[in-house]
Image (spheres, grey):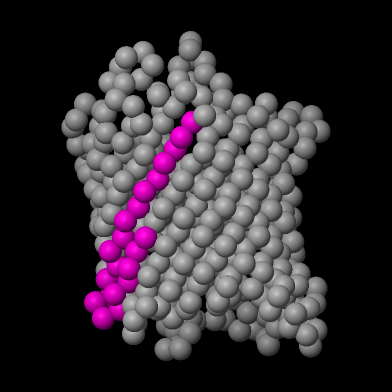
């Protein structure tokens, strides 16, 4: 570990420790209040993983590492202006990681031009976000890492992470709510991938969601609501730059079914087409691949939160289907998995144990080389405060 990396990690650990240890009122998080219109708050997130993963030779690798180590800061600088900053060291200690480095995940300002209006409809109609934030393509990409129904973000959702910024990009977004805040829209223009001249098109994204029951008005959506909200959300999204296209449709539910219990689910469809902008290219000499192949992907997650036990068993299915027959034979895969979460203190402290099997769509690739299913078992400890 280089000196700079060590300093980055030490600094972030210190900030997280301070944030988590900060005294807080019983009813809310600790907030530094300067005036009625100016405030500041801090937080931290740690997700420690231990996993047992099968390799292509049938052996199992064993690893203990920190999946996410995050420092959060948010606040208000004027009545209509808020900000959010999230820094991260990911996969700390995992083999193959190039080294711990502090990266900025989120850094954006939000301005509500109608915040002073007496009409709640007008107040919520428009919010302008500027900076680095999540690309609004699909429900899973916009979901909080604290409350995934299963262990982590879906592999098929990560296909959209072609710029390596954690499903985020720098840009400008218009966001708001209509129809008594049941309908949400997000329209954004991003930097995307730039050519040397910088004359190529910007990256454009849009997302619509309709909540039939309770409204969801945060930056990121919750998976588990612990029986406190009734969610039935329909959504669709698009992400495009040049001839690249990504389309999504999803249905999310979080329904109280008994006293303190909750039935949760997410069904998501994604279509990717790299086009000429991000077309799939194989370099046989360098043995490298780049771009995004045309594919149709599906994610299904279900969970049942048992309030009396603070326990949630879950199951997950994921399918990555490539339109090109040879490519699908070589790389097409399905994921099957399940596990449980034990919530000591909701999102603030919980444990997850998850099993996943990556099952190839074919027993052999186009060259006749056998393709083998791989198993993985992961345990996670999560601590969070904000």
Quadrant of residue 115 in the image?
bottom right
Residue 117 in picture, x, y percent from top left:
80, 84
314 part of magenta stretch: yes
Which residue: 27% across, 33% down?
Answer: 373
Question: Is residue 208 among what the camera can see?
Answer: yes
Quadrant of residue 347 in the image?
bottom left
- 338 lies left or right of 328: left
Residue 83 against residue 272 in the figure, above or below: below
- 303 lies left or right of 159: left
- 84 lies left or right of 95: right
47 part of magenta stretch: no
Which residue: 58% across, 73% down?
Answer: 212
User: Residue 46 or 324: which is nearer the viewer?
Assistant: 324
Examine the residues drawn in magenta and state their main secondary structure.
strand
Q: In the rendered structure, which segment of residues is drawn in magenta?
A: 302-322
Locate the N terminus by quadrant.
top left
Quadrant of residue 338 in the image?
bottom left
User: Residue 272 or 355: which is nearer the viewer?
Assistant: 272
User: Residue 206 or 211: which is nearer the viewer?
Assistant: 211
Which residue: 48% across, 84% down?
Answer: 28
Residue 13 in picture, x, y percent from top left:
41, 60
């Amino acid at each position: 570990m280089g000196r700079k990396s060590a300093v980055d990690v030490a600094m972030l650990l210190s900030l997280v420790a301070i944030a988590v240890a900060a005294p807080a009122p019983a009813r809310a998080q600790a907030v530094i209040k300067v005036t009625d219109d100016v405030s500041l708050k801090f937080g931290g997130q740690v997700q420690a993983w231990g996993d047992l993963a099968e390799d292509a030779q049938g052996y199992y690798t064993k690893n203990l590492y920190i999946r996410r180590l995050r420092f959060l800061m948010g606040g208000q600088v004027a009545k209509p202006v808020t900000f959010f900053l999230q820094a991260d060291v990911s996969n700390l200690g995992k083999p193959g990681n190039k080294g711990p480095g502090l990266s900025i995940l989120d850094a954006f300002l939000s301005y509500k031009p109608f915040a002073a209006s007496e009409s709640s409809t007008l107040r919520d109609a428009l919010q302008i976000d500027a900076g680095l934030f999540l690309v609004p393509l699909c429900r899973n990409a916009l979901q909080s890492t604290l409350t995934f129904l299963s262990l982590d973000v879906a592999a098929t959702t990560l296909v959209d992470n072609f710029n390596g910024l954690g499903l985020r990009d720098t840009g400008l977004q218009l966001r708001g709510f209509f129809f008594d805040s049941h309908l949400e829209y997000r329209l954004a223009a991003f930097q995307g991938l730039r050519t040397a001249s910088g004359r190529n098109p910007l990256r454009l994204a849009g997302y619509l969601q309709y909540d039939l029951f309770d409204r969801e008005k945060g930056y990121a959506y919750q998976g588990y609501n612990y029986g406190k909200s009734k969610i039935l959300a329909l959504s669709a999204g698009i992400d495009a730059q040049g001839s690249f296209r990504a389309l999504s449709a999803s249905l999310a539910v979080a329904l109280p079914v008994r006293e303190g219990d909750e039935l949760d689910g997410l069904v998501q469809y994604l279509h990717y087409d790299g086009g000429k902008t991000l077309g799939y290219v194989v370099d046989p000499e360098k043995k490298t691949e780049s771009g995004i192949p045309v594919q149709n992907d599906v994610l299904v997650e279900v969970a049942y939160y048992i309030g009396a036990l603070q326990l949630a068993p879950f199951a997950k299915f994921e399918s990555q289907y490539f339109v090109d027959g040879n490519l699908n034979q070589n790389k097409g895969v399905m994921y099957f998995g399940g596990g449980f979460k034990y919530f000591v203190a909701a999102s603030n402290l919980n444990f997850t144990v998850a099993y996943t099997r990556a099952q190839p769509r074919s027993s052999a690739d186009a060259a006749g080389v056998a393709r083998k299913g791989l198993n993985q078992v992961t345990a996670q400890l999560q601590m969070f405060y904000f």
